[in-house]
Amino acid sequence: MSGSARLAMCAVVATLASACALLPLIETVTWLVQAAILLTVQSTVGALARRVPLARPLTVAVQALVTLVLLTLVFARSQALGGLLPGPDVFREFGQLLQEGADDVGKYAIPAPATTGIRLMLVGGLLVIGLAVDAVAVTWRSAAPAGLPLLALYSIAAGLAQSGKDWLWFLVAAAGYLLLLLAEGRDRLARWGRVFGGGARPPSRGFLASGSGPALAPVRTGRRIGALALGIALAVPAVLPAMEGGLLEPRGQAAGPDRDDSSGFDAVRPLVTLRDSLNQPENREMMRYRTSTESTREMYLRVVALDRFDGASWQPSERRVTDLPELLPTPAGLAPGVRTDAVNTSVAAAGSYAQNYLPLPYPAERVRVDGHWRYEPEGRTVAGDRGQTTRGVRYQVSSLLVQPTAAQLAGAPAPREEVLREYTKVPGSLPEVVGATARKVTAGSANAYEQAVKLQDWFAADGGFSYDTEVASGGGSDAIARFLEAKRGFCIHFSFSMAAMARTLGIPARVAVGFTPGTPLPDGSMSVGSKDAHAWPELYFEGVGWTRFEPTPSRGTAPDYTAAQEPSAADPGVPAPLPDRSTAPSARPPSASGCTPQLRRLGECPPGASRAAAGGGHGGRLSPGAVAGIAAGVVAVLALPALPSLWRRRLRARRLADPGRHTPGAPGPGQAAEHTLAVWAELTDSAWDFGVLPDESRTPRGAAARIVRLGGLTGAAAESAHRVATAVEQVLYAPRPRPPAGLAEDVERVRAGLRASARRPARLRAVLAPRSAARLVWGLARRRTAVAERWRSGRLGTAWRRAGGALRTALGRT
């Protein structure tokens, strides 16, 4: 295999390695396989074009054209001319697919499905980056700058995913980039040999003293450039702000319980947002289950309980977790006199449902599941540990179907003091109208049970509320008050508001998140889809425990024990009749619009909650601060390639400056000699920028002749090069040197001649990526060595060595 082919193959590998950081964002990996095939074709076309050979810009153009044809074949074949050639219809189709992909990014949760729009964004973007890497590293033979597009790809992916395996994807991307650097270095050495020999040498006052540096091998320089680029790759994702919403939702906060028993759910803050699940274009199946109970309308599958209320949203408290026990403890508050039926349920989660929490009927008594799972006793929540999710998991649950009567709930004693203290907290910022409305609605109630039923019925039927996802009820601490005035919303609004109002009445309350029972299938199983995601309030009654209520109109089923506010004293054991409430979702089509900031602050769309209910993030918008941070990061990344060019321009201006501009009269002999050597350094560096590598073994006259020959200089430009070389020999060897004037103009003529004889790509590289910028790296190395030497020879260094020696002696004695 030739060096060019090997380098092209390494460029493909490096691009795919960096693209691996995108894998946590998408459900399947088929898009990466597709991209790998297309990248291979793109790279092969480039190799053939270079073998012809074609001009470098023409090679890149041919690769770009073939890439467009490939994308047309894969994504828009039916719109292509003859099924192959892209035309206006193809570009319109691409625009439509990209728009759909952008909508899907804001709509779906992580990991998102590989829709056609998202696949076009991923595969097309990867091909563009692959073309840039191939052009820079292979066509123009400069592998180090090719790390910039790879850096951008990895940084964006790592900033979005922020999964527990970020370090693994970094190692993969870093290995790909280092492989590319190594291949380029080996190819360069094979073609040119070691251009610069020997190690670093101290600066000399002789020939080229003003501009020379350590003669480093290209491989060593490549290693330093690689280390610098990898350092940037580590730093950029760390400083970019976290992004919220849909596919842009960070996953770091949904990693599951910490492995340490003391930390529990510190890293898990699943705030509820169900709107994305309800607004998805299709009802994706999350799981199927079979159960032994015939009362499937009570089979709510609970994911997590939110018990901390700050006035604007509900969140789970940070609690200790334990290993999942064989038998779960008795539910808090449940007395033996309450009727309970044992229920056995087998659940099979879909491969597309990757949630850290295990959906369970409440209260579960025993959970049999393979994998790494942890248990939080207070909320009776089971969550994955060490990256464990529900994806494709099968498990069995033994639970209790608690069936209290209205009389038992009405006669429940006051809750224990610790329960009242923790679960009736309301912030002082909660508007007074919330508590006043709760008292008004429940006026005349004899007990907490009657208050709870009146609240439920007021929301569900009597208060004029309607189920609607297209709401904008405001945000902040007055969100609930605005919802009570607008009287439009969906399960989040109703459950949040009823739980808050119950707390103002002194009833312990929290919010549960999970799924309604689902839809029965012909084979007797139940199918739970994304549109079954739901939230409901749980109120605590001593002797019964945490009890479900259903305030959301047209969603779920109201429990039997809430049908009559006044329980019958004659036959308290007979369940009340089931009210006429449909188990089907509302006929109103879900909104396709994204969550507004007002709804997010209300609690409808807080960050991370669809992970608690449907396995992912939500479709919010980027905040202005996030946009500004991203823009700053992008500008910083894009500005990196301009640094060598800016440094060279500044160095050239300093070298060619008039030595007498700061002092009156003619410059002295010392200044004239220094100026002559600086001008010569600029001439050799300018030739280096245009591809004429410096040769320290030659005399100034021989070096000038070599520059004239290899640079194609003629006429005045060649004469100027020889004149500068003669001036250098005067400075170095004449007893009383008299360098001529106008040396700076001579260098400009030489640069103009080099530019005129070079091809356009060489001219562009001399301006945008000058080869002599390697001296900047050498200068940094010299400064680092000088600082280290000063430290070792200074007082602090001496004292440090003495202290270290004393410590080693003391440790040796012990």
Image: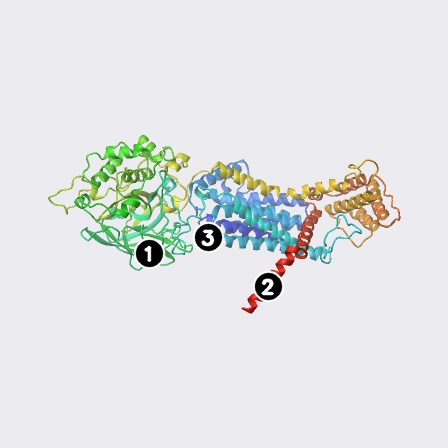
From the top left corner, tell me how far across and down residue 556 is, in percent: 27, 42
The disc at residue 240 is none
Q: Is residue 610 visible?
A: yes
Q: Which residue is mark 2?
A: 806
Q: Is residue 9 visible?
A: no
User: Does the residue at mark 2 contact the one at mark 3 (Cβ under 8 Å)?
Assistant: no
Q: Which residue is mark 3?
A: 164
| Pointer 2 local density, CA inside 10 Å: few below 14, some 14–19, many at least 20 | few
- Look at label 1 and name its amino acid: Tyr
From the top left corner, tell me how far across and down residue 809 is, in percent: 58, 66
- Look at label 3 and name its amino acid: Gly
Q: Where 31 sits versus 276, above or below?
A: below
First in sequence: mark 3 vs mark 1:
3
From the top left corner, tell me how far across and down residue 151 is, in percent: 57, 48
| Pointer 3 local density, CA inside 10 Å: few below 14, some 14–19, many at least 20 | some
Farthest residue toward the bottom? 813
Q: Callout 3: helix, strand or loop?
A: loop
First in sequence: mark 1 vs mark 2:
1
- Look at label 2 and name its amino acid: Ala
- Position of 444 compared to 584: left or right? left
Q: Where 381 sits versus 585, above or below?
A: below
Q: Callout 1: helix, strand or loop?
A: strand
In space, the residues marked 3 and 1 are separated at their CA atoms by 24 Å
In space, the residues marked 1 and 2 are separated at their CA atoms by 62 Å
User: Does the residue at mark 1 contact the one at mark 2 (Cβ under 8 Å)?
Assistant: no
Colour convention = rainbow
Q: Which residue is mark 1?
A: 395
Q: Callout 2: helix, strand or loop?
A: helix
From the top left corner, tell me how far across and down residue 566 is, in percent: 16, 39
Q: Nearer the viewer, mark 3 or mark 1?
A: 3
Q: Where 190 sits versus 540, above or below?
A: below
- Position of 756 compared to 333: left or right? right
